[in-house]
Image (cartoon, grey):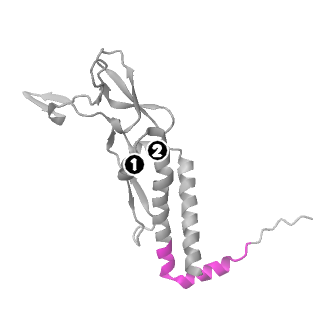
Amino acid sequence: MANNNVIVSGLDETINMLDSLGKGADALTRQASTEAANDLRDTWLISTVSGGTGISRGIIRKNARITRASAKWPGAKIYFSSAGIPVEEYNYSQKAAGINATRSQVLVDWVTGGKKVAAGFINQLGKRKMPLSTRNEKRKGGKTYSYGKGQMTAAMGPSLATAYLDLPENEVQNQAQARLNDRLTYLLDEALN
């Protein structure tokens, strides 16, 4: 007859070792969490987002801020900026909009492998063919309110927060969990040996 029992050994010893570390175990878990968040951002997230969009690694690092784990917040967090990223930082193309001969839609490469429409246009008949933002003017009563002082500015693409939301959720969780397990195992081995 086959044995259907699973025997887990070493659990009591591990619990006793962690208890012997006392508050040191908490510090180790916080350190592991912070190091895992840094590793996740600097390797997997940057390569995934940069590879799909063409955004430089420096721009992604700047827009993905990490807060360290602390006694108050036991897990490290990665905050993704919701500010738009200039279209020129992306790999982009244009598509004739059909509205006007001087207007083309700006399409940026996206993390899902497709294209995403950016907020702006490209003048098809212009010499430089730069992605420009749509002028935003509002008239109320006798006053005119304009943003950007009436000047043409660079078009903005989607934010890094939007790119993060389009990443496969299970894959992000799996990558984060694997990195946390690796760091925690390494730090515990160092502390106990």
Residue 81, horizontal then vertical, whole percent: 35, 49
Instruction: Give the residue type that dot 1 points to.
Output: Ile
User: Residue under circle 2?
Assistant: 49
Crowding at dot 2, Cα within 10 Å, few <14 / some 14-19 / many 20+, comes out as many
Could you tell me which secondary element the residue under label 1 belongs to?
helix
Indicate which disc, 1 or 2, sits on the residue closer to the N terminus.
2
Would you say 6 lies left or right of 26 here? right
Residue 161: image x %, image y %? 40, 46
Above or below, 187 against 105 in this view is below
Is residue 22 or residue 155 the one in the foreground?
155
The residue furthest bottom is: 20
Identify the secondary structure beneath mark 2: helix
Relative depth, front residue between 152 and 5: 152
Q: Looking at the picture, does residue 183 appear above or below residue 114?
A: below
**Highlighted magenta segment, given as a residue range:** 8-28
Q: Relative to residue 12, is residue 182 drawn left or right?
A: left
Rendering quarter of residue 125: top left
Image disc number at residue 60: 1
Q: Is residue 80 above or below residue 23?
A: above
Assess disc 1: are there few (<14), some (14-19) or many (≥20) residues with their C-alpha within 10 Å of its C-alpha. Answer: many
Q: In this view, which residue lies farthest toward the front? A: 127
At x 47%, y 70%, the residue is: 31
* Amino acid type at image mark 2: Val
